Amino acid sequence: MSTPAYDAGRLALMLNELRLPTIARLWPEFAQRSDKEGWQATRLLGALLEHELAERAKRRIERHRAESHLDPTKTLATFDFSMVPMVSKAHVMALATGDAWLEKGATVLLFGPPGAGKSHLGSAIGHALIDAGYRVMFTRTSELVQKLQAARQSLQLPSALAKLDRFDLIILDDLSYARKDQAETSVLFELIAERYERHSLLITANQPFSGWNDVFPDPGMTVAAIDRLVHHSTIFEMNVESYRRRTASDKQNSRRRQSSSDNHKEGATNMAE
Ligand code: ADP
Ligand code: MG
């Protein structure tokens, strides 16, 4: 004699109350298979819970990606390492797993002229870390400085900085564009000091440290900021010509080659006539 079935409507209500949308969606099909194939009760329960957990992890990563403000097209898959031979792909791949360097709040610094691929490489590392379960925020440095200054004006700076603690990594893009007038209130220094040895930063800048005097209010603060940033850091100097310029001139060259070989062909046909 079989036991009476549980009321499906009540099951749906309880799954909703417990916020288990995946189980709510899958259980009818799973229960049917389980009844037909005579699964053990533990197998049915285990299968449903595993699906709920997997979907939950997927949704969490999607949320992290949405909050990160990362450009979805700038990933490791679209980054051509052959363009920056001085950057070790193996080293970048190791950073992209997170782990040790994020745990000690270390810094990654990407230096190079405009168009060298700094923002792309920084974003690519950010995406990989999100895939690995970390939380990342990408921002132009000047934009974040503006927000933090507004927070300071309304006496909210400590709580604004504390809110940023939820990110395992903050990518500060174009640090050397944050100008002194902006930095007057030194919020950038406070961000660096606040995260030091606790949470990581990845910084891109057109100028290496020697050009950072304009970024902080006074030389003492510049030295103190750099000191903290380099303490646990990886530095990539991407001294290559602009990617856009190189790919544009590659295209031009191949067009030139193409048209000269077309001329050749025409020449050949002409001669054959
Ligand atoms: P930077 O931040 O150094 O000024 P970007 O990362 O913005 O340079 O790169 C400029 C453009 O060239 C972007 O569209 C970027 O995707 C592309 N780019 C740069 N370097 C590479 C590379 N190595 N592989 C693929 N695309 C690249
Ligand atoms: Mg850039």
Image (cartoon, rainbow, N blue to C red):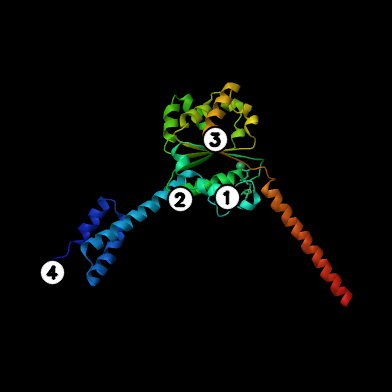
Where 47 falls versus 248 (above or below)? below
- Mark 4, residues whose alpha carbon is within 10 Å: few (<14), some, or many (≥20)? few
Looking at the rendered structure, the secondary structure element under dot 3 is: helix
Labels 1 & 2 near each other (Cβ < 8 A): no
Q: Name the residue that disc number 4 marks.
A: 2
> Looking at the picture, which amino acid does disc 3 mark?
Glu
Q: Name the residue that disc number 2 marks.
A: 131
Q: Quadrant of the C terminus?
A: bottom right
Looking at the rendered structure, the secondary structure element under dot 4 is: loop
Decide which of tag 1 and tag 2 comes sooner along the chain: 1
Spatial CA distance of label 2 from label 3 is 25 Å
> Looking at the picture, which amino acid does disc 1 mark?
Lys
How far from the left and from the top, in percent, is residue 41? 21, 63
Decide which of tag 4 and tag 2 comes sooner along the chain: 4
Q: Name the residue that disc number 1 marks.
A: 89
- Mark 3, residues whose alpha carbon is within 10 Å: few (<14), some, or many (≥20)? few
Decide which of tag 2 and tag 3 comes sooner along the chain: 2
Decide which of tag 1 and tag 4 comes sooner along the chain: 4
- Seen at 22% across and 61% down, the residue is 42
> Relative to residue 104, is residue 271 drawn left or right?
right
Q: Name the residue that disc number 3 marks.
A: 143
* Of 124 and 13, the residue lying toward us: 124
How far from the left and from the top, in percent, is residue 241? 70, 45
Spatial CA distance of label 1 from label 2 is 18 Å
